[in-house]
Image (tube, coloured by chain):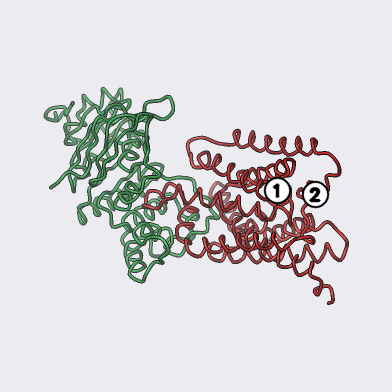
Amino acid sequence: MGVAITLRDVTVSYREDVALRRVSLEITEGEMVGIVGPNGAGKTTILTVVNGLGRLLHGEANVLGCRMQAGRRGRDFRLSNAARRMRVRIGFVPQGQNVDPRLPVNVREAVMIGRYGRIGPGRHPKREDWRLVDELIDLVGMTPLAERPFGHLSGGEQQRTAIARALAQEPQILLLDEPTASLDWRSRQEILELMHRIHRDRGLTTLLVSHDPRETFDLCNRVVLMRQGSVYAFGPPEQALSDANIQEVYGKSPLCCHGDGHDHRHERADGEEAGGNGRI
Amino acid sequence: MGVFEYQFMQHALLAGLLGGIACSLVGVFVVSMHLSFIGVCLSHAAFAGAIIAMFFGFNPVAGAFVFSLGAAAAIGPLADRGDFNPDASLGIMFSLMLGLSFMFLGLMEGPKTQALGLMWGSILTVTQEHLILLAVVAFLVLGTVSLLFKEVQAVIFNREIALAVGLPATWILYGLLILTGLTVTASLQPIGGLLIFSLILNPAAAAYQLTYSLRKLFILAGCFGVLSCWMGLALAYLFNLPSGATIVVFSTLIFLVCNLFSPKRRFKQLRETEGASINA
């Protein structure tokens, strides 16, 4: 297995705030890596760096062979053609956003947008493209809503559509930015199950940003625990998300107080001490 | 109908056809990407450019062209930056352009008929050169919409997602802004600098009420644009009204009627009553 993503000493800043501080990571092909941490820890920024949309102040990122180096005054790769070609191979599911309900795009068209980078300018989607799109809509369980305007969907339905669109790219890397944020419990479970199935069946290199460490615990091979723009721990979930690390980063154990306010302390085997703490 | 035998009327009808198509198609980008204020800025920049060029004895069309392109280049990065609201900078640009126009208008000596004509427009005195310019711009706009339909659709859907699937979304946005600037420049003489933007906004906003299909949106907007120009022209001729203003008022009427019969309005009402019954 080769290396899919390397970040070396990456520093990113938005205006005055430093969003990432000297972050180095190496992610192997086919791995599912969770990125967790409190708000503002720089989780989403890691995804933007991988996608060539973050402003690199220092360091370099190497993604699928595309090398992105920081310039002297910070640099993003929005206009770069090499980064554009790289993005064709990276499926991206952004955080749920407010969508204009009158938007003139339906679910099938929204998923087809994922093919556009591959199809290329001046050409139209072919029958095979539509067939693939319909298969993916079926995979995410959206077939009954395929003709519905995108703006009329619920949050969970929009996320399913976004996952289908990302897969329509036939990507080598999948980036998921809090795909379950602001969803109800049932939609969350369904989306998590869907991501698990996709990763199992397709073996895509996947980065999953989550505000809830529990979500990544069972799903991911390794977890990056972020704090204030730096990597606090990186390793297998039971190491990186050890009680001591969680305590240190969140101030209190999220296994007891995070999310829906219920006591989940006993969901894990009581008192089980994870080996090592994965600190780096 | 002897009136159609006059060359000025034939020119006016042709200008209405070309201008109506160019303005309303560009309007679809502007309306569905929520860039209305940016469009207003561009049209005032073109107006200021034309007045300043006239003051210095240059061709007003050249001045309008340079200024609207300059404004598009300045506004592009503002519009592309999603992380802050460019309202204040746009407001400053808008008022500066209006200020420059009136300043140079005040500095002009002698009768200001030609300069004031640019403000109100006069479709009945369109020259052959204006028609050629309008035809070129209308052809460019139509060409962009048909050749780059899927790219335009993706950028309208969501610019960050268009970038993420590997489309040069930032370049496409700049291209659309420049196209808007060109359309404004070419329509300055027939419709007038202060009125042009309603012809861009109204037909597209009217069509936006009626359909969820982008293809139909372009077709409907084009029809409404030409209808506004021709009906405005006819009413102006019959009742001896200023042509540009009549066109704009008629296009607003079309918008109001469409808004009244909009199925999207029904959807909104339905959602509100559903919400109310759930809350009850």
Q: Is residue A242 left or right of residue A151?
A: left
Q: Quadrant of residue A214?
A: top left
Task: Find residue A256 and report its horizontal and vertical position in percent.
Answer: 29, 30
For the residues labelled 1 and 2, the Cα–Cα distance comes to 10 Å
Residue nearest the viewer, comparing B76 with B122:
B122
Mark 2 neighbour density, 10 Å: few (under 14) some (14–19) many (20 or more): few
Find disc 2 in the rendering and name its residue: B114
Chain identifier, colour red = B
The chain letter under disc 2 is B
The green-coloured chain is labelled: A
Sooner in the amino-acid sequence: mark 1 or mark 2: 1
Tag 2: residue type?
Gln
Disc 1 designates what residue?
A: B60
The residue type indicated by label 1 comes to: Pro
From the viewer's perspective, tell me whether residue A125 is left or right of residue A234.
right
**Circle 1 SS class:** helix
**Circles 1 and 2: CB distance less than 8 Å?**
yes
Outermost residue toward the right in this view: B239
**Residue at the spot 63% in from the left edge and 45% down from the top edge:** B42
